[in-house]
Image (tube, helix red, strand yellow):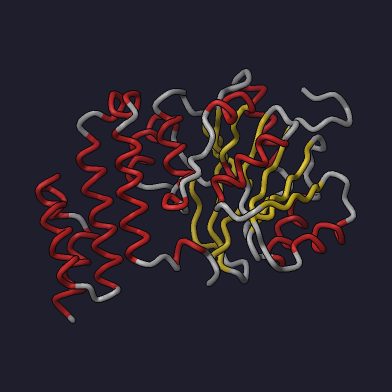
């Protein structure tokens, strides 16, 4: 599968001021049982000691690149342009890779004859290592489930290099934190996904995770942009058809919850009415009801 000494896998890691977390991530990658890989750390305009962390590893497989800040989508695309591997894995700079990660990826590629993309199972852990849950996908259900819940971990997704370059991440700043989700949806409507049941990486939950610190205004701008981009994609619309109204309403309820937590009562009501007009059955979902209860209590 690989000529000795050349990277078959390119692990692209965007990072921004996460030196202490990055070090743990890189240390988890080093003992891979599959040896033919390179790691491209893309520092997206950070001001910390990430460069020194990489240098201290003294590992020729781990490469450091610095670029102006443009968010993760642009950093991942930058890494993809530099990468030499046949398959790309866009790993997060605060998560951990188990030693079998690339070995299992190589097994998947051999078993399914070089698929366009595939996903390896992963788990969620607290910072102290305590297991929270495992995420194992069934191939037949991925396309429908991922439309409503982005649980395809970047760590678990592998893209063939030609696919990654044909379908790059969107680089719009307003899409930040959902640029991977938007890409997975586009790809799922174009190619069959293969899924491994073997857990090979871990998403670590900590206070610095960006998804937990987004302001309501950014949530609204992000989700409206995502809706617009996907609705302009004829392949996506043909793939999901009637489900897209529910998808939009689900995003509206996410906006509602974010606004409710920020105590913006009038805006919660406004988006609740929009969600109900879009997909009336959204009334019975937990997030819709939780948002309404939140503003009533206040």
Tally the marks.
0
In percent of width and height, residue 174 lies at: 42, 52
Q: Quadrant of the N terminus?
A: top right
Q: Is residue 60 above or below residue 216?
A: above
**Which residue sits at x=24%, y=76%?**
263
Image quadrant assignment for residue 255: bottom left
Left/right of residue 148 with respect to residue 66 in the rendered view: left
Left/right of residue 130 with respect to residue 149 in the rendered view: right
Left/right of residue 182 with respect to residue 13 in the rendered view: left
In depth, the one of 138 and 147 nearer the eye is 147
Q: Is residue 9 above or below residue 163?
A: below
In percent of width and height, residue 60 lies at: 88, 46
Which residue in the rendered view is the most extreme toward the bottom? 298
In percent of width and height, residue 196 lies at: 56, 35
In depth, the one of 14 and 172 nearer the eye is 172
Q: Quadrant of the C terminus?
A: bottom left
**Which residue sits at x=46%, y=37%?**
183
In percent of width and height, residue 125 lies at: 56, 62
Which residue in the rendered view is the most extreme toward the top? 113
**Which residue sits at x=18%, y=66%?**
267
In depth, the one of 122 and 43 nearer the eye is 43
In depth, the one of 188 and 100 nearer the eye is 188
**Which residue sits at x=81%, y=57%?**
54
């Amino acid at each position: 599968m690989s000529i000795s000494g050349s990277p078959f896998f390119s692990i692209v890691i965007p990072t921004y001021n996460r030196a202490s977390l990055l070090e743990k991530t890189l240390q988890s990658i080093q003992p891979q049982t599959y040896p033919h890989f390179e790691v491209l750390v893309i520092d997206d305009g950070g001001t910390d000691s990430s460069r020194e962390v990489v240098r201290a590893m003294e590992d020729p497989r781990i490469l450091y690149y610095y670029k102006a800040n443009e968010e993760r989508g642009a950093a991942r695309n930058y890494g993809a342009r530099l990468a030499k591997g046949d398959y790309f894995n866009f790993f997060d700079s605060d998560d951990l890779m188990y030693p079998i990660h690339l070995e299992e990826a190589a097994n998947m590629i051999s078993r399914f004859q070089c698929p366009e993309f595939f996903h390896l199972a992963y788990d969620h852990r607290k910072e102290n290592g305590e297991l929270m849950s495992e995420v194992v996908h069934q191939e037949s259900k991925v396309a429908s489930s991922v439309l409503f819940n982005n649980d395809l971990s970047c760590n678990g997704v592998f893209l063939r290099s030609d696919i990654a370059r044909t379908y790059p991440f969107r680089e719009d700043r307003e899409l930040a934190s959902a640029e991977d989700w938007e890409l997975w949806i586009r790809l799922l409507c174009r190619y069959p996904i293969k899924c491994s049941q073997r857990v090979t990486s871990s998403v670590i939950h900590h206070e610095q995770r960006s998804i937990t610190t987004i302001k309501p205004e950014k949530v609204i701008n992000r989700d409206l942009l995502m809706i617009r981009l996907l609705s302009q994609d004829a392949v996506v619309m043909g793939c999901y058809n009637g489900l897209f109204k529910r998808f939009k309403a689900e995003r509206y309820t996410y906006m509602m919850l974010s606004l409710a937590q920020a105590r913006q009562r009038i805006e919660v009501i406004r988006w609740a009415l929009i969600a109900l007009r879009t997909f009336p059955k959204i009334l019975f979902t937990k997030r819709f009801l939780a948002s309404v209860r939140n503003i009533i209590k206040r």
